Image: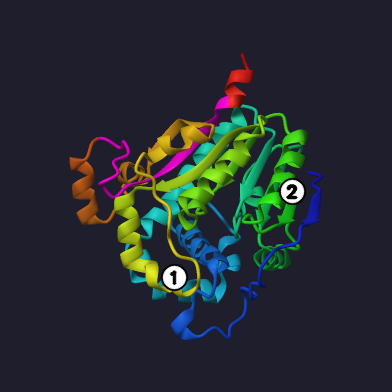
Amino acid sequence: MNCRLERALVPRSGGQVRPLNDQGASTKMLIRDISDTALLAAVYRARETERANALFYDPLARRLAGERGEQIAKSLVFSEKNSWSWFIRTYLFDQFIAQCLKEGCDMVINLAAGLDARPYRFSLPANLKWVEVDLPAITDYKEELLRDEKPACELERVRLDLSDVEERRRLFQRLGASARKALVVSEGLILYLTAEEVGSLATDLASQETFHYWLLDLASPALLRLLQKGMGKPLEDAAAPLKFAAEEGPEFFRKFGWRPAAVRSMFHAAGELKRLPLIMSFFYHLQKSEDFKSKRPWAGACLLENIASSKSAF
């Protein structure tokens, strides 16, 4: 299969992010910045891959996570106790992405792509355009580790700080002009933004009618409070506090041009797959509805549809 890897360099505002493979990090501050959370996500993908009954297979995750990823994971007790949520999120995103590709999406735009390796581990059409957007340091780290690997489709990496609004709008315009039906993915991103920032990003994405779908993960206010209590301090110390949860749930995005197309509760998905801890399995059997509830700890994978795109189809 012939594949083409493009590199796009966009200036980043603000300070530099330290290399992820720097082993000199203090034990008191294993998470040094927001990019280090990508190591944590890679650890849980690696652990799931190594299970006999794995829900997905990511052969690059262990290499990408490295030793620091395991150190970070073991330092976060709350995260370790709820590790099921990490690999269930990956599983649900995999399912939604596969569904959108079957529907004819010709471009995937992964915002804050981190150490995601789907262009390498998925079976994809060679002519599919996959665009990864993230900060320069984590992108450099990833590119170095994967330099001898070949993606299954056309892959472009864009080095961009998404808080640079003008630059991201220029990027979205360029991509929107070259796509027919694009899927935007933001896995583990909006939790770190304010409601105003989420609304601004949603508006910018909706302005491109060819951006047909947006796949994201969402937490309820009740879950956000639990996350802030359980693992908020090390993230705050790394200038990556957890911020966003919407009282309206997925309906929050409607006023910015997006409507919910499909929503899956991570808790219920884990229950169906028998991946919940024993005590949580008991509550799963009591809670039949997976609908969003703001006062209940809830996390979901949400596939949103661009309202302007759906109108133009008729």
Residue name at image x 52 percent, y 53 percent:
189
Q: Alpha-carbon neighbours of circle 1 within 10 Å: few (<14), some, or many (≥20)?
A: some
Image quadrant where one finds the C terminus:
top right
Residue 56 can be seen, yes or no: no
Tell whether position 183 is magenta: no
Residue name at image x 79 percent, y 47 percent:
3
Judged from this view, the residue extending furthest toward the top is: 314
Q: Which residue is mark 1?
A: 236
Looking at the image, residue 215 lies above or below residue 52? above
The residue segment tinted magenta is: 289-307
Residue name at image x 46 percent, y 43 percent:
92
From the top left corner, tell me how far across and down residue 5 is, in percent.
79, 52
Residue 14 can be seen, yes or no: yes
Camera-near label (2 vs 1) is: 1
Report the number of discs.
2
Residue 175 got which mark?
Answer: none
Q: Is residue 162 left or right of residue 261?
A: right
Image quadrant where one finds the N terminus:
top right
Q: Is residue 59 left or right of residue 224?
A: right
How is the rendered protein coloured? rainbow
From the top left corner, tell me how far across and down residue 297 is, in percent.
29, 50
Q: Which residue is mark 2?
A: 155
The three-letter amino acid code for the residue at tag 2 is: Leu
